[in-house]
Image (cartoon, grey):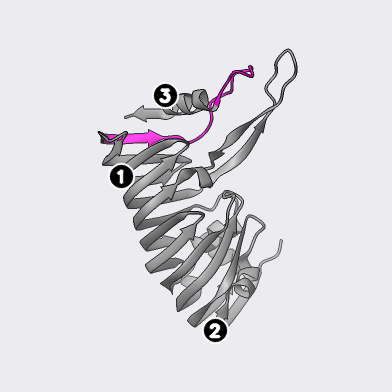
Amino acid sequence: MTNTKYQVSANGGINFGKIYKVFGTKRHTIEGFAQGAVYLKGKQSDAQLGHYNKLINKGKFYLSNVRTTSKYLPLPFYITKGIFTFNNDQLQFTNFNAKYGHSNLKFNGYVQNIVNFLTQDKGVLKGQFQLQAPYLNVNEWMMPVNNKLKSNTSTKETIKGVVILPKNLDLNFDASVDRILFDDLNIKCLQGKTKLKNGEITIANGSCLVIDSPVIFAGNTILVLKLPKPKLTTEYTNQEILHDIITVNLNLK
């Protein structure tokens, strides 16, 4: 088993692609440049085991036009501008502006356990964010799913897709979204505390408008954005799939 030692020092322009080669896996990529200073020194094993007191990771970056990809997302995620600072294994995000498809996001917050998350399949990324968005198109976050639906004529159909929620994320959001598009459903004025953990989204004490009617989330509402087992018939339409997602996976606790 390899135990990579790393020491990276940079001041001025920074190439994230080169730095990522130290920690990178095929699950994620990052490309782009930033202005700032960074000093990284330590062993990969100490980062993975949580021995952060043995690591020296610090720095501050001014980002612009950074591109990232993930196996969980069908489209690249762009950071148009923002400032983040290193504090060992914690990253602090300040005044971040991002774009994904037609969705524009603004957020502040932090994540921690970043090295373990990037290098280990079971590494959990933890964090807290304040999120604002004028528009969020959930359909663009859906990964395509191909299903062979049996019938007398052996017809093949393709279900549009699902949003994959990784189980190795433990993130909290104070969310404010003006408009959300999910399939053909328009949701407006979403406000509330949202938690993503163990592949589930939980909305606590939130509110929104659905077909211009107010909806209140009292307590915790768990949304599991995955498809139920499809019916083995060619008549199983996208409308029925959406109905089953809402009725099967929307649970109140």
Q: Earlier in the sequence, mark 1 or mark 2?
A: 2
Residue 13: give its label.
Answer: 2
Q: Dividing the image into 4 quarters, which one contains the C terminus?
A: top left
127 shown above or below 159: below
Secondary structure beneath disc 2? strand
Callout 1 touching callout 2 (CB < 8 Å) = no
- Is 214 included in the stretch rendered in magenta? no
The one of 167 and 237 positioned closer to us in this rendering: 237
What number is the disc on residue 247? 3
Disc 1 vs disc 2: which is toward the camera? Answer: 1
Q: Quadrant of the N terminus?
A: bottom right
Residue for badge 1: 190
Query: Mark 3, residues whose alpha carbon is within 10 Å: few (<14), some, or many (≥20)?
Result: few
Residue 2 is left or right of residue 84, and the answer is right
Task: Report the number of discs.
Answer: 3
Crowding near the residue tagged with mark 2, few <14, some 14–19, many ≥20 C-alpha atoms within 10 Å: few
Instruction: Give the quadrant of residue 134.
Output: bottom left
Mark toward the start of the polypeptide (2 vs 3): 2
Residue 183 image position (x, y, % from top left): 48, 36
Label 3 – label 1 distance at C-alpha: 20 Å
Q: Which residues are magenta?
A: 217-237
Dominant secondary structure of the magenta stretch? Answer: loop
Give the residue type that dot 3 points to. Thr
Q: Amino acid at mark 1?
A: Leu
Q: Are marks 2 and 3 in contact (CB under 8 Å)?
A: no
State the residue lying farthest toward the right.
153
**Label 1 secondary element:** strand
Q: CA distance from mark 2 to mark 3?
A: 51 Å
Question: At label 2, which amino acid type do we have?
Answer: Gly
Q: Is residue 165 visible?
A: no
Residue 37: x, y in percent?
48, 83
Look at the numbered discs 3 and 1 and tell me whether their residues touch, using CB distance below 8 Å.
Answer: no
